[in-house]
Image (cartoon, helix red, strand yellow):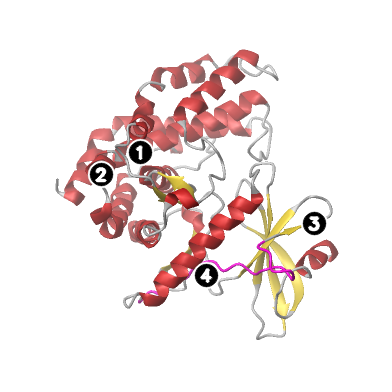
Amino acid sequence: MNELSSILSEFSMEGSPIYTTPIGSGHINDSYLIKTSPEYAPDYVLQRINHQIFKDIPGLMKNINVVTRYIRNKLDIIEDNHQEMQVLELIPTQDDQLFYNDPTGNYWRLYYHISGSHSYDRIENAELAYKGGRAFGQFQTLTAGIDPEILTVTIPRFHDITWRLGKFDEVLKIDPVNRAHGLSKEIEFVLSRSGTMRAIHELGSRGDLPLRITHNDTKFNNILFDDENNAVCIIDLDTVMPGYSLYDFGDAIRTGANTGAEDDAILENVGIDLKLFAAYAKGFLKVAGPALTRNELDHLAFSAKFMTFIIGLRFFTDHINGDNYYKIHFPGHNLQRARAQFKLLESMEAQFNRMREIIGELVRW
């Protein structure tokens, strides 16, 4: 608490911190709920930003500030904001900066805690999936007026499949910690799909997909819900930057419509839940659908396969490279994650025609 108290003293917060508790289950940052006194003072969320992953902290924080201010202004003028959607609000430092860089080189930021909210690590039913789809669809519509070019690219080539495959080939050839031996099945899995998985990248390169503001980490636990299970806020905005809407839709399906866990050790548990897929797609398209182009709509189902492939590829590459990117909780964790993603992709491939039919029924093209 002493270390965090000294960090908190750098911010323009109300009240005095009573205690802190770690929160969240993300792979990247460390987050703490800060309870304060007196009772009327707001609570906060303090986060240490992983500057090993995010190299441009000022650019990242500028993005968050631009997007949250814009959404807040939009919500203020929306008359039918009946669910009381909220947006994260940054607390400036004592010298009016968006973050604090401590003497040890760590970067910190502070948000107001959204009281009475909770999140789900898994989608529990179709109703929640629908509400989650609406929430991320609304995020896309609320940010539609921001010029994507003014935002910093916080992680260059984040979903650039050509670059990711090149990195995979490079790591595979070097095999720095001698882990590639015995993984021929997984290696062939990647190589056999490396051509078809370039479709979104090729569309974008030709200018056939519009550049939008994208969240780029649309896991279901990045939606906060109120006590009545209405979605109230989208969180974890570190990767908000220019991108394609297909990234956000696909990653939401990858994480939300999986019958197993992202790192499930029992591969029989893993598969695509078509009921959750349909419910999420219905909610997303209800809000964002009218603004999507034909190319975006036509590739929504494919985007789920793409995001599952590229995340599995990243887990697999990180395993071979010695676990330098993602936090792991035991030896072989990244390999276990990769295998679970590859199993999910196989399930999507087996049911891909039905996934496309569901999208077609929702948009009635």
Q: Specify few, some or many for label 3: CA neighbours under 10 Å numbering under 14, 14-19, or 20 or more.
A: few
Residue under pointer 3? 102
Residue under pointer 2? 297
**Which of the pair 325/94 is nearer the observer?**
94
Give SS at disc 4: loop
So how many labels did they put on this image? 4
Amino acid type, mark 4:
Ser
Residue under pointer 4? 117
Residue depth check, mark 3 versus mark 4: number of the one nearer the observer: 3
Amino acid type, mark 2:
Leu
Position in image of residue 340 (x %, y %): 49, 33
Residue depth check, mark 4 versus mark 2: number of the one nearer the observer: 2
Query: Is the C-beta separation of discs 3 and 4 under 8 Å?
Result: no
- Find the distance from the CA under tag 1 to the CA under tag 3: 40 Å
Closer to the chain start, of discs 2 and 1, is 2
Give SS at disc 2: helix
Residue depth check, mark 4 versus mark 1: number of the one nearer the observer: 1
Query: Is the C-beta separation of discs 4 and 2 under 8 Å?
Result: no
- The answer to whether residue 347 is seen in the rendering is yes
Magenta residues span 82-98
Q: Residue at x 26, y 59 (%)?
A: 286
Please give left or right for residue 201 compared with residue 19 in the image.
Answer: left
- Find the distance from the CA under tag 2 to the CA under tag 1: 10 Å
Position in image of residue 276 (x %, y %): 34, 50
